[in-house]
Amino acid sequence: MKNIFRHPSRSLAAKLIIAISLLMIIGSFVFWYATLRKQEQDLLSIAVKYGSSFIAFIKESNRYSMLTSNQPSIQKTLEDISMAEGIKRVRIYDHKGKIQYSSNKDEIKNAVEINSLACTGCHANAELSAELLPASKKMGHI
């Protein structure tokens, strides 16, 4: 048994051990790669769902204030929401990409580029603001 690895080309046992070891290493690599890839996809899916539900929450929180054009109430709601942990800022854009409301008052009336992630994350064509991507293709940004 001691001499099987001295001349592996002559020993069938050495060849089998090497082949099985290589197959185990390759199989293990494929398994872990697939597992990590699946985890990455799951995390991205969770982030998109969280982002979408957060956007729906903001819409519902401001629905009545927007219907009645109560601008101070809308602004206050956005400022309150942005105080939550993990939320950097909250913005509401008009159809031309101009910031109408923001948790950071200095950003109001500034415009974003139509081709920026703020627009293309949800809109198929930024020029046609009514054309939204299907929910499964949205990037989900917060």
Image (tube, rainbow, N blue to C red):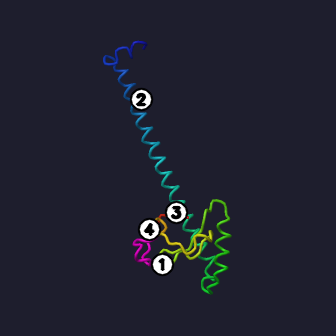
Question: What x and y, as percent, mark residue 50?
Answer: 57, 64
> Label 4, label 2: how many angstroms apart (C-alpha)?
48 Å
Residue at the image position 34 percent from the left and 15 percent from the top = 7
Residues tagged 4 and 1 counted as in contact (Cβ below 8 A): no
Q: Quadrant of residue 62?
A: bottom right
> Label 2, label 3: how many angstroms apart (C-alpha)?
41 Å
- Disc 4 marks which amino acid? Thr
Q: Nearer the viewer, residue 119 or 62?
A: 119
Residues tagged 4 and 3 counted as in contact (Cβ below 8 A): no
Of marks 2 and 1, the one in the foreground: 1
Residues tagged 2 and 3 counted as in contact (Cβ below 8 A): no
Q: Which residue is mark 1?
A: 95
Q: Considering only vertical position in the picture, is 110 above or below 43? A: below
> Label 2, label 1: how many angstroms apart (C-alpha)?
61 Å
Task: Tell me the crowding category of disc 2: few under 14, some 14 to 19, or many 20 or more residues within 10 angstroms, Cα based.
Answer: few
User: Which comes sooner in the sequence, label 2 or label 1?
Assistant: 2
Q: Main secondary structure of the magenta part?
A: loop
- Disc 2 marks which amino acid? Ser
Please give the range of residues in magenta.
Answer: 120-135
Residue 123 lies in the magenta stretch:
yes
Q: Quick one: SS at disc 1?
A: loop
User: Which comes sooner in the sequence, label 4 or label 3?
Assistant: 3
Q: Quick one: SS at disc 3?
A: helix
Q: Considering only vertical position in the picture, is 22 above or below 47? A: above
